[in-house]
Amino acid sequence: MNNIECEILGLSQGSTGSQSGAFALLLKEVEGNRRLPILIGTFEAQAIALELENIHPPRPLTHDLLKILLDNLGATLINVVITELRDNTFFAKIVLEVSALTNEIDCRPSDAIALALRANAPIFVSESVLDSAGVIPFNETTESETESEKRKGLFDEVPSFSREAKVAALQEKLRQAIETEDYERAAKIRDEIEKLSGSN
């Protein structure tokens, strides 16, 4: 199965109904328009946001420490891959090269992405995951947007990305509700999506 390179499009606090302290990390395929929303915890969201904003704490945080350990052991982070979606949980691997040998290590997508940012390593998502959990936004961003415009405001609430990330996260919840045949919840989530989409 092919892996598709993705980039981070946005990060926002979880929308209505999400678990306490959850954030929505929104990935976008580099050569396409599908988005992949992933709910992550507060600590992981902070680790990702700090690196994207180029903010370096005075002492290394956990993911900084992992990067330092890799460097000191002579390992290179080749890439990270979100490999599958099972029971509504995403799974990932980090791909390392040590002494000309390639190693794959299982980990959470949020940790993999936080580490990839620090190592300037590409982020990939398996095609099967994008096919099953990817969403196409209601309003496309223009192709002329610069990278800095797409990534600004990870700490500030930027309405366009905040709304898009919330819609993507809600669409993921809608899919889960339909899969579990919780149609009453699905109807409420659908209404929320329509409200957010109409607010444009």
Image (cartoon, grey):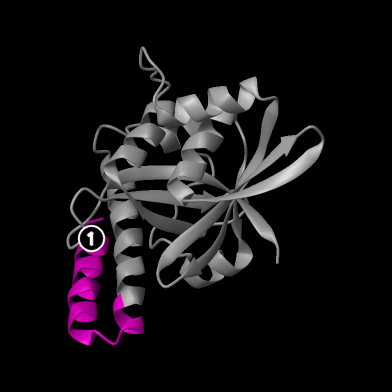
Residue range of the region highlighted in magenta in the rendering = 177-200
- Establish if 141 lies above or below 33: above
The answer to whether any part of residue 70 appears in the image is yes
Q: Amino acid at mark 1?
A: Leu
**Residue farthest right in this picture:** 100
Residue highlighted by disc 1? 196
The answer to whether any part of residue 146 appears in the image is no
Q: Position of residue 32 (x, y in %)?
A: 59, 56
Residue at point 48%, 47% (across, down): 142
Residue at point 50%, 42% (across, down): 113
- Establish if 182 lies above or below 188: below
The answer to which of 115 and 153 lies nearer the viewer is 115
Residue at point 58%, 51% (across, down): 93
The answer to which of 179 and 164 lies nearer the viewer is 179
Element type at mark 1:
helix
Question: In this image, 59 relative to 156: left or right?
Answer: right
Quadrant for the C terminus in the image? bottom left
**Residue farthest top in this picture:** 58
Question: In this image, 127 relative to 87: left or right?
Answer: right
Q: Is residue 78 magenta?
A: no
Quadrant for the N terminus in the image? bottom right
Q: Position of residue 97 (x, y in %)?
A: 73, 37
- Establish if 27 lies above or below 117: below
Q: Position of residue 153 (x, y in %)?
A: 32, 32
To which quarter of the image does residue 184 belong? bottom left
Q: Is residue 188 magenta?
A: yes
Residue at point 27%, 62% (across, down): 197
The answer to which of 115 and 8 lies nearer the viewer is 115
Label 1 environment density (alpha carbons within 10 Å; few <14, some 14–19, many ≥20): some
